[in-house]
Amino acid sequence: MKQRKLVMALATAIATAGLVPATVAAAGNGQDVDRVMVKFKKGAKARVKDKVGKAKGHIHKELDRNDIISASLSVDEIEALKQDADVVAVEIDAPRYLMSDTVPWGITRVQAAEAIAAGADGSGIKVCVIDSGIYAGHEDFAGVTITGEANEGQAWNTDACTHGTHVAGTIAAAANDTGVVGVSPDGNVSLHIVKTFSGEQCDWTYASDLIAAAEKCQEAGADIINMSLGGDYASTFERDAFDKLYAEGVLSIAAAGNDWNTSYNYPASYDSVVSVAAIDENNAHAQFSQHNDQVELAAPGVAVLSTISTRYSLLEVAGDRIESQPFRGTMEGQASGELVDGGICDAINGDWAGKVVLCQRSPGTFTQFWTMHNNVAASGGAAVIIYNNVSGYINGWFGVGNTSTIPALSLSLETGLDLVAGHLGENTVVSSAYELDVSEYGYKDGTSMASPHVAGVAALVWSAAPEKTNRDVRQALGATAIDIDDAGYDIRTGWGLVQAADAAAELANGTPGPVAGSAPSFLIASSEWTKSHKLRTEFFWTAGEANVDVILNDKVVLGGIANTGAAVHEDTPVGDGTWIYKVCNTGTNVCSRATTVNFDGRDVPPNNNGKFSTDAGRAMVLAGGESDEVQPKTASAPKGDTYVSWLEAGGKFDVYLQRIDRKGRGQWGDGIMVADRNLGYTTDYGLSADTEGNALVAYRINDENGIAQLYVQKISPSGDKLWGDEGRLLTDWPVHTLSPSIVGTTDGGAVLAWGDNNSKVWMQKLDADGNMMWAENLQMNGRGAYADYYSMGKADLQASSDGSAIISMVSQLGRAVSQYWAQKVDADGNLVWGADHVDVLADSYEGMPRGGWPVFVADDQGGALFCWHSTFGAGGTNVRAQRLGADGALAFGTNGVLVSTDDSHFRDEASCSYDAETGTSYVGWAERNSGNSAFGIRAQALDATGNRLWGDTGREIIPNGPGGKGALRALPADNGVIFAWGLNERPAPMYLQATRLDADGGFNWSEEIISFKTAPSWMSAPTSHVDDDGRAYFFWSEYITYDNDDLMMQSFNENGRLGK
């Protein structure tokens, strides 16, 4: 059935009787050729009806509110009525339709018809739509070639969300005398649908799903991909996938986003994807459309009419479809009956029984709506339709807890008045039931609607010259777009409103190269890295004089070259940054718009030259391969070298170890596999070194029963395994060992600590040959009569004086708040600080967040400095510090000292360092406001008794602002401290920075804060240590373009200088 829309009749006076039949007949198509509307004077209705009856005319409607009757009469009788004293006027009662094949305004605006008329009709081009599916049985897709696929358990050819159906209709709705038409309406463009969203709410998907969907598009032979979708966060993998598709000839087009701001939306903001902004019918930038320097083109995106696949309301009057909306709170159902006018429906009326009642909204709230419904329902009405009392639709609601007992719809004022004026008494069908997979039409706003306009135009354009490349099509679209905002390129609409006919002509007939009297225009740059680590940039442009200059950062790098519309430039970047290119007519300032080439850690090839880099953007790759290298740990090695260990997540999570010298050069090839563990998951392990410079590694291996047992291995400075291939087995019991730690002790031995899956903590000491020195493993118990009932967790382990070790533990008894305890164990396994341990944080004072277990540093005097964050109140966190003497005495008093007294901010991620020469304790932390919207880095110095030396709120290093800061590390420095941290500007700590402060809190380096990892790639929190010369070493796992998780490293000296 054709979709029809009732509209207000236009007043067309009938001048002469002779005009009536011809004019009415022109409407034709079976309509009455002699049907007119007769407007009579007040009080004359009965007389006019009588005259019509005597003339054997047929009365169709009586519109009493407007003093009109509709009737079919002969030409002579029409002329007679026109002369009658009781008649004001006579008009044709013309039929009204929603125009068959309505052409939405956007289709006209992008020159679709002109392009098709010129032969660019989309033939041979396939557009892939990644969306919520499509209702392939829609009447407006008849004759369109559509294929598709979806995830397992889903069907691509159904669309509960309607979004995908709307998008596809904009591209290819057929010209079939029904509904609407798309940009390519003749069935020449074929569609391939990849369904990635499902459900009525268009449930979300992930970057990996989008990558897979794009690959399916390519496999299906798609030339163009439309993505009316996006998200806030960039993905390196996703970007690489679209770069690859672009290089292989696919043109990807995506919505710029609807967040009313300048943020980037992905995938639209990748360079290899065309980002499309939305405009309205006035060619003005739609305010919701995101605006940034990635926006490339603009297209219609406001009030876009297209195909949809669901229906929530249906209203048919005498077989004509009327635009309606379901009333909020309506029951789902259907009804039919005679249409009657109920006025404002403020009373029960028995005449309404079995009828569909029109009610006009009266001033007030939903109470009146509910009263209207109740009156109609109590009258036995079949359905209620409420129309507005002001222009437009009602966003109507029956109120909390109210659900109608009969179907309820709403209408605009205009439609309601028209029904009252001309359609009362007609049979009316009402449905408020949800229907899926129906041929419907609807308006939508968004850059999601703009993107398919460009995709459809690109299909038309490409068909004009199918031998051209995706790059050529992209260039033609931009070069011919209408400039509708600021002159030239702008961040709101890019190059402007896309034009199909002009772009098709440009693609088919335009040739790159000189155009006398013109400036080079529409410059596109495409860059890639060479094997020699140079950045190779290829340029394409249109027009310009016979000779041009290529200019990089205001310097001519290619001068006076012949204008062929293309050029190549190579150079080696330093660090991260942006190159700004433009092309100018030689020796003039007549230039193209500038284009940028950005380079950073996602793009710069990793440093594999076997030494630390002086470039903060190119950290050294210590370990890389097909699998991920994760969980690095570090310890000092002889001659100023460093041991680094990691897990290789290639299916077994084996432990690897490498020794690197001070220049960053690996000494053992690709590293030594410490243990072949054959595990399917990551687990914690321990690394340390003994007094002879041997590496000590503690780890777990499952026995034949699948129980994780504890092993330890010693590896010499030359890389020999000293305790056999598997190492020494320390446990052989029926419970799993957990999270082992190991430290080399001053007497040449080692101490281990670990947990088990019964929430107990254990310790053991080994001599230099790996023999257990304590007859039994030492269990760290709770206190008093309930000692065995405590849940214990190992927090940290450090070596101390005279072969002893200090352990910190988090404990809990029942539902009590966690306690933070410390204990010193001498070389013989005796508890130096008493059987009840030392309270670093007293019972039930503040909570110890699970997973936020603290670390501490030994003070080289037999004691230790502890710092931690604990919880208080509803989500608050604070940082405290405590120093224990060699005898376990509390230097800073019970529960330690607060590092800041500022109650308006929260603090966490504490890290500390102790200066034995001055007795100063340094504590750093991440600070945030209570709304979690501003983050910073601060630090405090404490004297020997815990007095705050840098003021009550500490020393500001990074002021609070947007973007997370964390992964804080405090490292020792002469008469001061080094702090390093991560900047979480995207959803991972992407950048690393550091500073050195002196004892007074002053910045020590000429560059107050250095950046030592500027590649904005995903990474894990780094591990670090400082050697005897004050050089700091950092190691982390990082996602980079060229591999999976690779193990990266960087170093800087005591002056903040990077590299060797």
Image: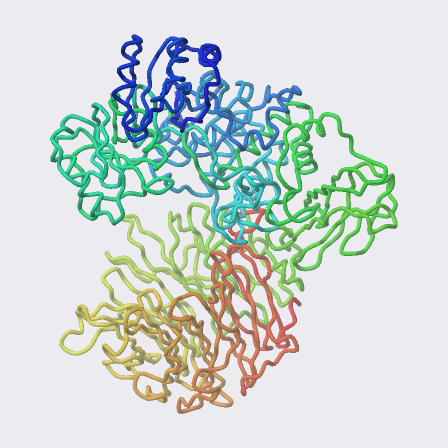
Q: Is residue 485 left or right of residue 317?
A: right
Residue 207 in picture, x, y percent from top left: 47, 43
Looking at the image, which residue is at 48% across and 44% down? 230
Looking at the image, which residue is at 33% across and 27% down? 41
Determine whether 592 is above or below 317 in the image: below
Q: Is residue 253 left or right of residue 355?
A: right
Tell me, yes or no, if residue 694 can be seen here. Answer: no
From the viewer's side, name the closer residue of 243 and 663: 243
Q: Is residue 626 left or right of residue 54?
A: right
Tell me, yes or no, if residue 909 can be seen here. Answer: yes
Determine whether 209 is above or below 294 in the image: above
Residue 769 in picture, x, y percent from top left: 42, 68
Residue 608 in picture, x, y percent from top left: 64, 54
Residue 1012 in picture, x, y percent from top left: 60, 65
Q: Quadrant of the N terminus?
A: top left
From the viewer's side, name the closer residue of 139 and 415: 415
Q: Quadrant of the C terminus?
A: bottom right
Q: Residue furthest front?
A: 85
From the viewer's side, name the closer residue of 329 and 44: 44
> Residue 576 falls in which quadrant of the image?
bottom right
